[in-house]
């Protein structure tokens, strides 16, 4: 009887602790999401209701005019076509930059971890240093380089910048993941006559899905949210959406339309939010996949 009573008491304590844990998590989630909730509520109000109400007051009726104006009618500097052209610019920058930096990182990580050569450790150390170089340090050298290559103020130039700066991170990710692959696997393939790219394409890439997902999510988020490189190296017609959003918020004709600003901010953040909502669990799995060794 005493054992049964002890089990019931333990079960009751576990339930109380579980309820307390979930309560704390819900409170923290609400606090974390509060800025986004305020932005969403504000974007659905009209200007008069924003001025007379409070931040957390719900809209009396839903207004989607601010969203339409943010997309295709708001002024971003001298242009009043909304953020839609710059939204597309960001995709033109992000997609090739992510694909190229991921491919280069995979090849670099493959070479450093499974094809040791003299100076490979020094090369990897140099790449690690590259991960910690502040953005501001490379602005002038990169501007000079883009000018010499003839791709300054172009989408191609921004792709080049993000590939160069991101390849150190992608190499680090792939190198740590490939360190967990037995070197005997590569040696056996070489004995069977497989070459460098055959091993990479037929053996290494098929088992690299977790870390590829991690790298794509990381690079997509970093490049999409970048502002400094975008404002420093883009032209007026090649600006990414982050620069356009800054111009929109700081451009005022007449009264300030906070609902339009909030709608534009949410639109600009939607791709990264979607990536983390649908692929967040794969990001965590991929990070832990190469954590056993290396």
Image (cartoon, rainbow, N blue to C red):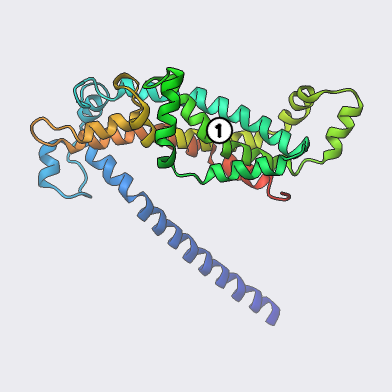
Q: Is residue 221 visible?
A: yes
Q: Nearer the viewer, residue 235 or 243?
A: 235
Is residue 256 toward the left or the right of residue 104 in the image?
left
Question: Which quarter of the figure has residue 138?
Answer: top left
Residue furthest to the bottom in view is 2
Identify the residue at horizontal 75%, vertical 27% (top origin).
Answer: 200
Graded by Cα atoms within 10 Å as few (under 14), some (14 to 19) or many (20 or more), the crowding at tag 1 reads many
In the rendered image, which quarter contains the N terminus? bottom right
Above or below — where is 211 with respect to 73?
below
Identify the residue at horizontal 39%, vertical 19% (top origin).
Answer: 154
Above or below — where is 54 with respect to 182?
below
Question: Which quarter of the figure has residue 195?
Answer: top right
User: x and y percent of residue 235 in the render?
Assistant: 32, 22
User: x and y percent of residue 247 in the render?
Assistant: 24, 31
User: x and y percent of residue 143 in the render?
Assistant: 40, 29
Residue furthest to the left in view is 254
Identify the residue at horizontal 89%, vertical 32% (top origin).
Answer: 188
Judging by the rendered image, the residue that carries numbered circle 1 is 216
Above or below — where is 108 with respect to 57?
above
Question: Which quarter of the figure has residue 263?
Answer: top left
Residue furthest to the top in view is 150
Q: Nearer the viewer, residue 143 or 19?
A: 143
Q: Is residue 45 visible?
A: no
Identify the residue at horizontal 10%, vertical 46% (top origin).
Answer: 52
């Amino acid at each position: 009887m005493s054992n049964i009573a002890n089990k019931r008491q333990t079960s009751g304590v576990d339930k109380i602790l579980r309820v307390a844990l979930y309560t704390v998590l819900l409170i923290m989630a609400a606090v974390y999401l509060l800025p986004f909730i305020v932005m969403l509520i504000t974007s659905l109000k009209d200007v008069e209701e924003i001025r007379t109400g409070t931040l957390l007051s719900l809209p009396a009726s839903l207004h989607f005019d601010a969203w339409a104006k943010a997309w295709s009618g708001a002024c971003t500097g001298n242009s009043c076509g909304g953020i839609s052209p710059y939204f597309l610019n960001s995709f033109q920058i992000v997609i090739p930059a992510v694909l190229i930096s991921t491919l280069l990182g995979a090849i670099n990580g493959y070479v450093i971890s499974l094809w040791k050569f003299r100076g490979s450790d020094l090369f990897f150390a140099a790449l690690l240093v590259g991960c910690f170089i502040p953005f501001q340090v490379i602005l002038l050298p990169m501007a000079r380089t883009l000018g010499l290559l003839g791709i300054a103020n172009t989408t191609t130039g921004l792709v080049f910048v993000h590939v160069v700066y991101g390849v150190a991170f992608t190499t680090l990710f792939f190198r740590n993941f490939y360190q967990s692959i037995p070197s005997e696997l590569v040696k056996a393939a070489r004995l069977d006559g497989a070459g460098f790219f055959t091993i990479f394409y037929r053996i290494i890439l098929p088992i690299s899905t977790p870390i590829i997902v991690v790298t794509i999510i990381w690079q997509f988020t970093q490049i999409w949210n970048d502002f400094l490189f975008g404002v420093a190296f883009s032209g007026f017609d090649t600006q990414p959406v982050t620069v356009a959003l800054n111009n929109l918020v700081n451009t005022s004709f007449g009264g300030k339309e906070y609902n339009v600003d909030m709608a534009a901010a949410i639109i600009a953040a939607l791709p990264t939010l979607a990536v983390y909502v649908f692929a967040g669990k794969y990001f965590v799995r991929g990070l832990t996949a190469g954590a056993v060794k290396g």
